[in-house]
Image (tube, rainbow, N blue to C red):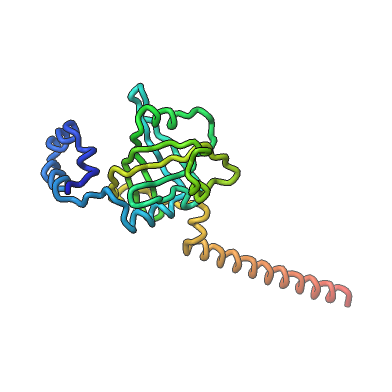
Amino acid sequence: MAHQFSSLTFTDSVKDVQREMGSRPANEKLTERGSPNDTFGDDEKDFVSRRDGFYISTVGETGWPYIQFRGGPPGFLKVVDDHTLAYADVTGNRQYISAGNLRFNPRAALFLMDYPHQARLKILGTTELILWKDAPAWKDQLLLPERARPERVVLIHLAAFDWNCPQHIPQRWTADELKQTPIIKHIESLEAEVKRLRKELAAGAADKDLKDNNAAST
């Protein structure tokens, strides 16, 4: 089976550029012999379950792409099955650009980033929007950001996925991620050491003042 991601994205224009840049032979082999990448495996499911945000791209009637960020507690983008993702779309600025675009064209592209480990997962899928009141009972399993009001469930039916190489991905950490790194423990130990030294200096200064006062009174 062909590599589905490249089958969908390597258009004639893309192939022309690949030929111009000398990369067409390698990319042709990828399309013909690469893994299908049309079913979520354990690695993809684990990666998705640990994300606290992703970027989603849609296209409307004008032909202009539109990119939006969706965030929530880790796991808010739920793996429903080997071919389906879901998340609760909550009330935002009420412009509904992404929702309107997906009504016109249900195709979407997702970028899932892991900045600390310099990894990214690209997902192509066809969406299905269901009003919250009409969504299946399992909608209550979807994790919601604090104080968020859900308006609809967005289903993403997988067409293909692809992993990007880590080159040029900057390393960044959220506050919660940073707490799990050795650097925070090192900072905490330094702060404890500074506190101890300040306490010792304060005690030493108090002793000196006491000795000076005693000497002055004799």
134 vs 81, left or right, is right
- Could you say which quadrant of the image residue 42 lies in? bottom left
Q: Residue furthest top?
A: 62
Judge by depth and name the residue closer to the eye, 83 or 90.
83
Q: Residue at x 79, y 70 (%)?
A: 209
Q: Residue at x 32, y 47 (%)?
A: 168
Residue 37: give x, y in percent of width and height: 25, 49
**Image height of 80 relative to 156, above or below:** below
**Image height of 94 relative to 71, above or below:** above
Residue 157: give x, y in percent of width and height: 34, 43
Q: Quadrant of the C terminus?
A: bottom right
**Image height of 152 relative to 53, above or below:** above
36 vs 83, left or right, is left
Q: Residue furthest bottom?
A: 218
Q: Residue at x 49, y 61 (%)?
A: 180
- Could you say which quadrant of the image residue 21 lies in? top left
Judge by depth and name the residue closer to the eye, 117 or 209.
117
Residue 200: give x, y in percent of width and height: 68, 71
25 vs 49, left or right, is left
Judge by depth and name the residue closer to the eye, 80 or 52.
80
Residue 56: give x, y in percent of width and height: 39, 38
**Image height of 191 relative to 80, above or below:** below
Q: Residue at x 21, y 52 (%)?
A: 35
Q: Residue furthest right?
A: 217
